[in-house]
Amino acid sequence: MKKIIGYCLLAFVVLFSYCGNRQETKIVPPENNSTMPNKEEVNTEKTYPLALVNNKKDPTCGMPVTAGIHDTAHYEKWVLGFCSKECKDEAIAGLAKNPKAILDTAIIK
């Protein structure tokens, strides 16, 4: 019986000494790694497919949506694509004042 208690105590001590000595390793990339892009080089904006929108050009700036759609807005039955959030915000303000002018600019019928 003393041997069983001795082995249990030994196993207990070994287990806790092992758990206390574990060290986490953290991977830190080097400062000047040429294979990693800079934070400024990473584009975090979403892009949307052309089939999603009803317009051929941005109603605010006139840029073709084939150059890239970075934001969308829904207005009645239309889905409008915009080149940027700023153009979207300006168009939404325009839709509140004169929706026909904005839609006529954006939608090619």
Image (tube, rainbow, N blue to C red):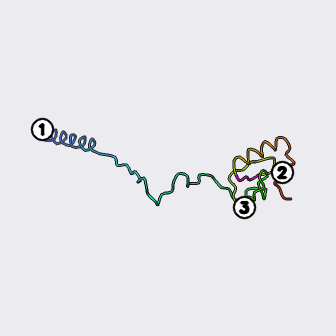
Identity, as a three-letter code, of the amino acid under mark 3: Thr
SS at mark 1 in the image:
helix
- Quadrant in which the N terminus appears: top left
- Which tag, 2 or 3, sits closer to the chain's start? 3
Q: Is residue 36 magenta?
A: no
Q: For the point 44% across and 57% down, which residue is it?
A: 33
- Left of 84 or right of it: where is 101? right
Identity, as a three-letter code, of the amino acid under mark 1: Lys
Task: State the residue position of label 1.
Answer: 2
Question: Which residue is nearer to you in this view: 7 or 57?
Answer: 57
- Left of 41 or right of it: where is 31? left
Mark 2 vs mark 3, CA separation in Å: 18 Å
Q: For the point 70% across and 60% down, which residue is it?
A: 67
Q: For the point 81% across and 50% down, which residue is it?
A: 77
- Which tag, 1 or 2, sits closer to the chain's start? 1
Identity, as a three-letter code, of the amino acid under mark 2: Leu
- Which tag, 1 or 3, sits closer to the chain's start? 1
CB contact under 8 Å: marks 1 and 3: no
Residue 3: percent from the left, percent from the top? 13, 41
SS at mark 2 in the image:
helix
Question: Which residue is nearer to you in this view: 24 or 86?
Answer: 86
State the extent of the magenta-drawn residues as a range: 79-83
SS at mark 3 in the image:
helix
Task: State the residue position of label 3.
Answer: 66
Task: State the residue position of label 2.
Answer: 103
Quarter of the image holding residue 17? top left
